[in-house]
Image (spheres, rainbow, N blue to C red):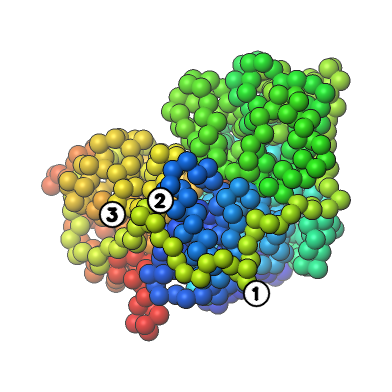
Amino acid sequence: MGKTLTEKILDDHLVEGELTPGEEIGIEIDQVLTQDTTGTMVWLQFEAMGLEEVQTEIAAQYCDHQTYQFDFKNTDDHRFLRSAAGTFGAHFSRPGNGICHNVHRENFAAPGKTMLGSDSHTPTPGGLGELAIGAGGIDVTVAMGGAPYYIEMPEVVSVRLEGELPEWATAKDVILELLRRLSVKGGVGKILEYTGPGVETLTAPERMTITNMGTELGATSSIFPTDEQTKDYLERVGRGEEYVELQPDDDAEYHDEIVVDLSDLEPLIAQPSMPDNVVPVSEAAGEDVEQVIVGSCTNGGYEDILPVAKMLEGREVSMETETIVAPGSKQASEMLARQGWVAEMMAAGVNFSEATCGACIGIGHVPASDSVSLRTFNRNFEGRSGIEDDNVYLCSPEVAAAAALKGEIVDPRELEDDGVDAPGVELPDQYDGSKTDLIAPDEAVDDELIKGPNIGDVPLKDELDSNLAGEALLKMDDNITTDHIIPATQDILMYRSNIDKLSEFTLSRVDDTFAQRAADADGGFLVAGENYGQGSSREHAAMCPMYLGIEGVLAQSFARIHRANLFNFGLVPLIIDEDTYEKIDQGDDIEIVDDVREGVESGQEEFTVRVNDDWEATATLNASRRERDMLSLGGKLPWTKQQAEGG
Ligand code: F3S
């Protein structure tokens, strides 16, 4: 039987297990990336494990989420990260140099490589044929130390592209169409492999818009084969020699196939407040728009902003609409500036921002209360913009530019009546921005760690108890995001390296008494519906509940990265059925009747949960041998140390 492209790359990197869906495999990792809000813990854990030098081919530390240094704590973090990259041998991308995925694709992403990143949109370079997976920080730490990364072998699904995009339909509409059809849970446990004749019609940056947002489907990763388009892009970024042709075998077998005819697509928009709440733009037309932002790791490339600049050239944005352009990388900004496009956009009324994640996580450009903000980003979870009553829509740069001109949501095809032509996709001859903000390991400015007062210690958990009992401290709905668990807004983000302080904000967006109640109870459980922990890779969403004494989470299902993070920090993730979920109330007394430690160690899958000493239900622990060993020892850090000591 032939192999899929995913299987070929995994096979090349396999160190343990077999490529059977659901089986745990260990793979060698070639590249890692981390960013400022997850990176501080990555390096503190690297230090705590006694590791001395990065072992992967490439390790890159980016500063992109919080680049504005308006509190010394941010600057302390940046300085610590630079010192860690220098000390341990990673590339360091300075604050303002751009978003990790954009800078990484310009400089390091390469076909056939594997990558692990402590950011959920790590799969972005799948558009170049790299198999990239988002993971918790400690997984990145361990991979960077040279150990394999363990994961359940996902199902490989073919997304067969046919036809060619019509004018005004874009790569963003391809992924929005998939979200419309499959929902934010549609890719869970899957790697989406793009196939079919439509692939060659998409440039590499367009492919990376699609692979970037595969994360919103819950997919483990997304990947395209490589071809002339890949080669062309690599040549334009000055790395043509890294091209390798990668295709699935003709007789490759996929678990499933989804067909998208590109020629059927039209401009789409995700309405508030989930990326899968997608409709044709024409259905949302007429809504007044107070803010438009073009940028992010999804649509912040040179090729994304150029169409906006062309549509705005010689025109003016609506007086009612604040229009912000924040490129994904300084290289894109520099090129657009040298070509005069920045001046054109400014003349049209655009506020041009530095290359940062910023507004994507509510840092800067927070919308006015109860107003509509149209963004080219990948997420519109409620409150993520920095204000609870937000109305954030997600769309392509072309739809965003049309709204900026009209002051309302409008199908961009209607602008043709005003003489606005479809801008199309255009790549520069050369991506030729300066590289002054990317410091290679051999140019490092520091050779020892610099820790300011905000850089705390790595929290550790005791080994697993035999008896687990406590209160159901919080009962939550479906689709709770990591933004709900540990918000990423500026007032909170600066404590990512200070868990004692950060934990005070745990689940504050769901219940602001939770952290205090959990600390007082010194133990207890979280209860949730489906898809608990979707969203980002932030391990703090497991680390902080652990720090507050939470012992386990009872949920109907877990998002992949968060589930792994729970094991990594020694919290027991138990699956309950819908009836049990409905019957448990917040405040109920919960007891796991079995000897939990013995059960975890012996491979027991079903545990009995007794509620209020009144009724019982079954909860399932679905875990590999390695995950069980980690739980028993209190998490991945003690487990890794034990492995290193030959335990
Ligand atoms: Fe940054 Fe938002 Fe992407 S936070 S990495 S631009 S999803």
Q: Amino acid at mark 3?
A: Tyr
The answer to which image quadrant residue 61 occupies is bottom right
Measure the C-alpha gap from mark 3 to mark 2: 13 Å
Judged from the image, the quadrant occupied by ligand 1 is top right
Measure the C-alpha gap from mark 3 to mark 1: 39 Å
Query: What residue is rendered at 81% in x and 31% in y?
Result: 310
The answer to which image quadrant residue 235 occupies is bottom right
Locate residue 234, reporting x and y percent: 79, 59
Q: Does residue 537 show up?
A: no
Q: Amino acid at mark 2?
A: Arg
- Is the CB of mark 3 within 8 Å of ligand 1? no
Q: Amino acid at mark 1?
A: Asp
| Marks 2 and 1 close (CB-CB < 8 Å) | no
Locate residue 269, reporting x and y percent: 64, 30
The answer to which image quadrant residue 14 occupies is bottom right
| Element under disc 3 | helix
In this view, the mark in front (3 or 2): 2
435, above or below 9, in the image: above
Query: What residue is rendered at 71% in x and 34% in y?
Result: 397
Which of pointers 3 and 1 lies earlier in the amino acid sequence? 1
Q: Does residue 108 show up?
A: yes
Looking at the rendered structure, which numbered label has been put on residue 547?
Answer: 3
222, above or below 60, in the image: above
Location of the N terminus (image quadrant): bottom right
Which of pointers 3 and 2 lies earlier in the amino acid sequence? 2
| Residue receiving disc 2 | 496
Locate residue 92, reporting x and y percent: 58, 60
In this view, the mark in front (3 or 1): 3
Query: What residue is rendered at 31% in x and 58% in y?
Result: 572
- Name the outermost residue toward the left: 613
| Residue receiving disc 1 | 12
